Each structure stands twice: as C-alpha cells, then as structure tokens.
Amino acid sequence: MNATGRLESVSKSIKGNEYLVTIRTDCLPEGLENKLLDISLKEHKEHRSADANRLMWACLGEIARAKEVLRDPWEVYLSMLRKYGKYTYIVVKPEAVEAVKRQWRECEVVGEIDIHGTKGVQMLCFYGSSTYNTKEMSTLIDGILADMSDLGLQRPASGEIKRALEEWEKHHGA
C-alpha cells in the first residue's frame, strides 16, 4: 500500500526501545491487521509539473525537426542532458558496466582506472530530468531554449516559459 499522510503523534513505549507512531492517512489499509509490515516514511513531494515537462518536449521536438542528423526527440533530449544536465562520476567493476548503462538515463565510459591494484571503470552518468529540482530543470530548459535560438527556431513566449517553470516550482519545490 502506498499512501500520503501526516505524522500525528509519536510516543515512546514503556519498554523504552519502541515507539508508537500515529499517522493520519488518505486511505485505510485492509487485510494487514496483526501482520509484520515493512514501513518506509519519507517526506512527500508533489510530482513535477506537466507544464514544464510538456514545454521541454515540445522544444525538443522542434529541435529534432530542425536538425538534419538528429531527428528523434529522444536523441535530442539525451544530447541536452549531456550539455546542460546534472551528472555524476562513478567507478564500477568492469563486469558491471552494461548493468549501469541500463540504470542511468545516459552514461558513458570515461576509462579504466586502478584502485589499489583492482581494475575499475570510471563512468560519467547523467540524471534524467524527472529527478531535477526547479533550479536544475530551469537550467536544462534555458539550455534547450538557447539551442533553439542558435538554430533560428521560434522560442515559446517568455510568459509561457515563466508560467511553466512557476508551475514546476509550485508542484516540485526548489
């Protein structure tokens, strides 16, 4: 069961090593009475605004149509992640490279390295935009819009861009 709720109260048991936690939730679990449960609590975050995502993909489609080599919006998206996106470097065992490629939105092998006599592969891995906060998404969209301008393409009206990013911030947080 997945639910949204608020922490209502916490009290420590007489045993001293257990807590009674009350959570007000938007649904009632059924069939879980007297069962041992795996419980995970994390701060709720709204899903990102569809407006900023829709704007981004519309712009990517325009770039894809304008480019002679890259005609697939997905390829344009991956190239924009490389140019303007959030990334990290990781080191993995050589046999894990293909599995890592399947887990990341976009990644590349930087090269082999030696760590205390053990061979590793350094990789550059790019996060997909669904993991971005408002500032990161704004940077990505600004980069995409700059590329549109460089190609002589009509950018969306600034009011539309501002509204999409404000909606993103409202639903996704800074």
Image: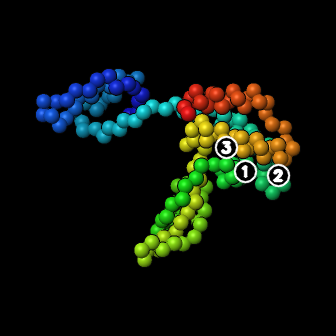
N-terminal label among 2 and 1 = 2
N-terminal label among 2 and 3 = 2
Determine whether, in the image, residue 14 is placed left or right of residue 169.
Answer: left
Asked whether the viewer can see residue 74, the reply is no
Determine whether, in the image, residue 116 is placed left or right of residue 125.
Answer: left
N-terminal label among 1 and 3 = 1
* Residue 48 percent across, percent down from the top left: 58, 34
Q: Which quadrant of the structure image shows residue 118?
A: bottom left
- Cβ–Cβ below 8 Å for labels 2 and 1? yes
Residue at disc 1, secondary structure: helix
* Residue 35 percent across, percent down from the top left: 24, 36
Q: Amino acid at mark 2?
A: Lys
In three-dimensional space, the C-alpha distance between marks 1 and 3, rounded to whole angstroms, equals 12 Å
* Residue 157 percent across, percent down from the top left: 79, 30
**Quarter the N terminus occupies:** top left
Camera-side residue of 99 and 110: 110
Identify the disc placed on residue 76. 1
The residue indicated by pointer 3 is 140
The relative height of residue 123 versus residue 49 in the rendered view (above or below) is below
The relative height of residue 102 versus residue 113 in the rendered view (above or below) is above
Q: Which quadrant of the structure image shows residue 123?
A: bottom right
Q: Amino acid at mark 3?
A: Leu
The residue indicated by pointer 2 is 67
Q: Nearer the viewer, mark 1 or mark 3?
A: 3
The residue depicted at 67 percent of the width and 49 percent of the height is 84
- Cβ–Cβ below 8 Å for labels 2 and 3? no
In three-dimensional space, the C-alpha distance between marks 2 and 1, rounded to whole angstroms, equals 9 Å
